[in-house]
Image: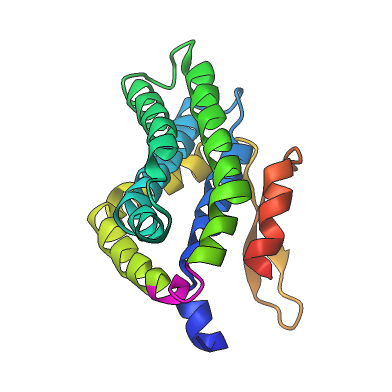
Amino acid sequence: MNTVTGMLCPSVITQIHFDHLHVLALHQQYRSDSAPLAKQGLVDSVCRALEVHEQLEDEIFYPALEAVNGPVMDQHAASHDEMLRSIDALREMDAYDADYDAAFRALMHAVIHHAADEETIVLPDAERLLAGELDALGARMARRRLELVAAIASQVARDHVRGLCGDPGCCWERRRAPRDSELCYTRSLPAYPRCALLDYLVPRISG
């Protein structure tokens, strides 16, 4: 796959890396003292991203890996079910509930274990066993992703806006453009704690 095509349609491994990075980055923005609207937006964004990620893996990635490596989904199914239970629990709650923060932490605990297992065991095996199929699987996953996201596009946009606009720690800075007198606006985010898994993933996406 050439460089341009690879940028437009990353391999299946790169897409899974990115999904993990995306969810962990959203998690880093969550604050217990944020406005309930911001919490709800971020949590809903995380839940929808996880549901799309899991469906793509279940439909495309794991069946391809099982075809060359035998049954590998049993352990994945357990973490998948744990995440779905946590998502269902969160959706039964309101962001004003006293246990909302704890419920989100429980979800992210399951997510981090799932992502760490895939990043350190499953994906290295897949890179070796599916070396000749990674780009084709990536193309399939990208097409299916577009279908899944198109069906929930309005909800994704709503959650994103809620997560931005409801967070008092996120503001818009007014600044002057460097080469002309036009004013433009840039989003300023507070600094977030370091995350070992994020530090592991960033080079794999950017490189």
- The residue sitting at the left extreme is 151
Res 150 quadrant in image: bottom left
The total of numbered circles placed on residues is 0
Q: Can residue 14 be seen in this snapshot?
A: no
Q: Which residues are magenta?
A: 130-136
Q: Please tell me which residue is depicted at 50% across the width and 57% down the height of the picture.
A: 16
Q: Is residue 168 left or right of residue 89?
A: right
In this rendering, the answer to whether 140 lies above or below 63 is: below
Q: Please tell me which residue is depicted at 71% across the width and 62% down the height of the picture.
A: 203
In this rendering, the answer to whether 18 lies above or below 105 is: below
Q: Please tell me which residue is depicted at 49% across the width and 34% down the height of the picture.
A: 38
Residue 160 placement (x, y as % from top left): 44, 48
Residue 189 placement (x, y as % from top left): 68, 47
Foreground residue, 33 or 86?
86
Q: Please tell me which residue is depicted at 52% across the width and 36% down the height of the picture.
A: 111
Foreground residue, 75 or 70?
70
Residue 132 magenta-highlighted: yes
- The residue sitting at the top extreme is 98
Q: Quadrant of the C terminus?
A: bottom right
Q: Can residue 67 be seen in this snapshot?
A: yes
Residue 176 placement (x, y as % from top left): 72, 69
**Snapshot colouring:** rainbow
Q: Is residue 52 left or right of residue 40?
A: left
Residue 100 magenta-highlighted: no
Q: Is residue 34 left or right of residue 77?
A: right
Residue 124 placement (x, y as % from top left): 59, 57
